[in-house]
Image (spheres, rainbow, N blue to C red):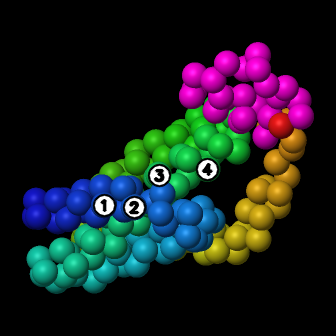
Amino acid sequence: VSIVSMLISGGTVISSLLSVRLVARLGTEKITAISTSLTAVALFGFSCSHNLLWLCLCAIPLGIGAGSIDTALNNYVALHYYAMQMSFLHCFYGIGVSLSPYLMSLALSENMNWRKGYRTVFFIQMTIAVITIITLPLWKKVQTAQTDEEKIFKLADYRCQSGTDLSKYDISNS
């Protein structure tokens, strides 16, 4: 079964490395919708699995979806929000990571099998995917609400990181 874990990890690494190109091409909002949908489909596949080959096939979209969403959302929140919102993002990630083993344990203790546990997690993930798809238009509103002040701070941050002497520039007119 360790091959399944390796495939998930490999998919996560590959999609994380490709996420810059994917986000540039599709945007964070579409990557989020696609990633949550991919992971939901993979979880459903796990719940229907009857052999190792099927688990291996379902591990690929699970890893790809997991890597893309992590990188894309972390970048998006870092660019558009404050540290507090990034903390909330990671807090809810932690809640999800903590709840998953609990849900599987609950499924196993209620005389269900591991497939029904994965099916339960699939329904939760599919709900998140549907909500993400329905809220796609809201992403545009957030992107256009960026103020000139935020643009100035980003320019100043870039100049500081690149070692450029800020005294030569009038940042207020940038």
Tell me the residue that label 2 is attached to.
Answer: 18
Give, as a three-letter code, the residue at label 2: Leu
Q: Residue at x 65, y 43 (%)?
A: 79
Q: Nearer the viewer, residue 41 or 29?
A: 29
Q: Determine whether the residue tagged by mark 3 lies in a helix, strand or loop.
A: helix
Question: For this view, does 156 lie left or right of residue 59?
Answer: right
Height in image: 155 above or below 34? above
Q: Nearer the viewer, residue 5 or 120?
A: 5
Mark seen at residue 71: 3
Height in image: 109 above or below 83? below
Give the distance between the C-alpha atoms of the residues marked 3 and 2, in whole angstroms: 10 Å
Start-end of magenta stretch: 151-173
- Based on the picture, tell me whether residue 142 belongs to the magenta stretch: no
Q: Determine whether the residue tagged by mark 4 lies in a helix, strand or loop.
A: helix
* Badge 3 or badge 4: first in the primary sequence: 3
Give the distance between the C-alpha atoms of the residues marked 4 and 1, in whole angstroms: 19 Å
Tell me the residue that label 4 is attached to.
Answer: 76
Mark seen at residue 14: 1
Give the distance between the C-alpha atoms of the residues marked 1 and 3, in whole angstroms: 11 Å
Are the residues at dot 1 and dot 2 in contact (C-beta closer than 8 Å)? yes
Question: For this view, does 116 lie left or right of residue 160?
Answer: left
Magenta stretch: dominant SS? helix
Give, as a three-letter code, the residue at label 1: Ile
Classify residue 161 by image quadrant. Answer: top right
